[in-house]
Image: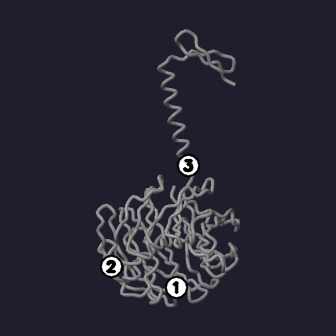
Amino acid sequence: MPSSKTVGRLPSVVTAGIMLQVPFGVRRAIAALVAILLIAGSSQAAADTLVVGNKSEDTVSFVDLDTGNELARVPTGKAPHEVAISPDGKQAAVVAYGGKTIDIFDIATASLSRRLDISPGEAPHGVAWLQDGRIVATAEKSSGIVIVKPRTGSVQLVSTDAKGTHMLVVSPDQRRAYAANMMSGTISIIDLRRARKISDINVGGYPEGIAITPDGKELWVGDNSGGRVRVVDLATRAVVATIESDPVPIRVAISPNGEIAVTSHIGSGVLNVFDVASRTRLRTIEISGNREAVQVTAIFSADGRRVFVAETGHNTVAEVDIEKGQVLRRLSAGKGGDGLGVAP
């Protein structure tokens, strides 16, 4: 165990039985270096934060993924169904599906920074935060999507001319958004640079859950009217495969490496796991295994090893090891936790 003592004006350190005299300036430099290393180490060790929109009580939860503890629960607009994390990981956008606003939260302090009015858009649901700082969200009651600039508060409403515009995804190059129109059986393609609708893709059924492959070549779309997932080739804008799934695949997520897709099933409390390349179902993972859990949102962790699954009926989020097919733990949130985001 190293010990220290003072000899004259120079501090000395005894280590391994050898006394070393360290000049004051060198000691300060060493102390500064140690401080830098400690800060860097603590930054690297900092846990991710799970952000949960609690739609049944109008709050958002901030959960430390290291300890599993809820750090804070903060009021939101009405019915916060979905969450998007800013590109730098410092902020969260939480929609008010029961109103006309999007709340911006500072994640480090778990505090509301700003409330954005998206009028004339109403009932925002699916949401994405673009690299250029804009936020894109569906506006279901307005039959379109809104493109919002948080810094200026400007809002552009782009009509889809469709019913039930509910969920959306954005292409990897950030040029287009794809919005699922539940009651029209279509996917609208939106040009995000020109703020206009390009066309629709007819997929049929009751499309809600939607995901895009990391290469931007395919959409995977769940059909709530039956047990099936449709794969859309975006080059031809046509359905090229229909894959059997458990009933009501209400959410679809694709792993960051593009190899695995999962569907979340509200009625059965399971995840179906698919191989993206072969478009085949690999296995089923039981999460709750029951309807009472009201299982909805599913998102991958950044490393693709885990999936977080909202159990809205139980006010919990299941953390799942996708390779082992096991629920690792359940994280408590507010009432009706649904929309999820993970911030570094």
* Quadrant in the rendering for residue 337: bottom right
Element under disc 3: loop
How many marks do you count on the picture? 3
Label 3 crowd (10 A; few <14 / some 14-19 / many >=20): few
Q: Are marks 1 and 3 in contact (CB under 8 Å)?
A: no
Please name the residue shown 65% across and 21% down the image.
Answer: 3
The N terminus is located in which quarter? top right
Name above or below for residue 188 compared with residue 110: below
Name above or below for residue 106 compared with residue 275: above
Label 1 crowd (10 A; few <14 / some 14-19 / many >=20): few
Q: Are marks 2 and 1 in contact (CB under 8 Å)?
A: no
**Nearer-N-terminus badge (2/1):** 2
Label 2 crowd (10 A; few <14 / some 14-19 / many >=20): many
Query: Marks 2 and 3, Cα distance to the nearest angstrom?
Result: 39 Å
Please name the residue shown 41% across and 81% down the image.
Answer: 140
Q: Which residue is mark 2?
A: 158
Q: Nearer the viewer, mark 1 or mark 3?
A: 3
Name above or below for residue 262 compared with residue 30: below
Element under disc 1: strand
Please, what is the three-letter code of the amino acid marked with disc 3?
Ala
Please name the residue shown 67% across and 65% down the image.
Answer: 323
Across and down, in percent, residue 84 comes to 46, 66
Query: Marks 1 and 3, Cα distance to the nearest angstrom?
Result: 43 Å
Please, what is the three-letter code of the amino acid marked with disc 2?
Val
Q: Which residue is mark 3?
A: 46
Across and down, in percent, residue 52 comes to 53, 65
**Nearer-N-terminus badge (2/3):** 3
- Looking at the image, which residue sits at the far top? 8
**Nearer-N-terminus badge (1/3):** 3
**Is 73 positioned to the left or the right of 198 in the image?**
right
Please, what is the three-letter code of the amino acid marked with disc 1?
Val
Q: Which residue is mark 1?
A: 240
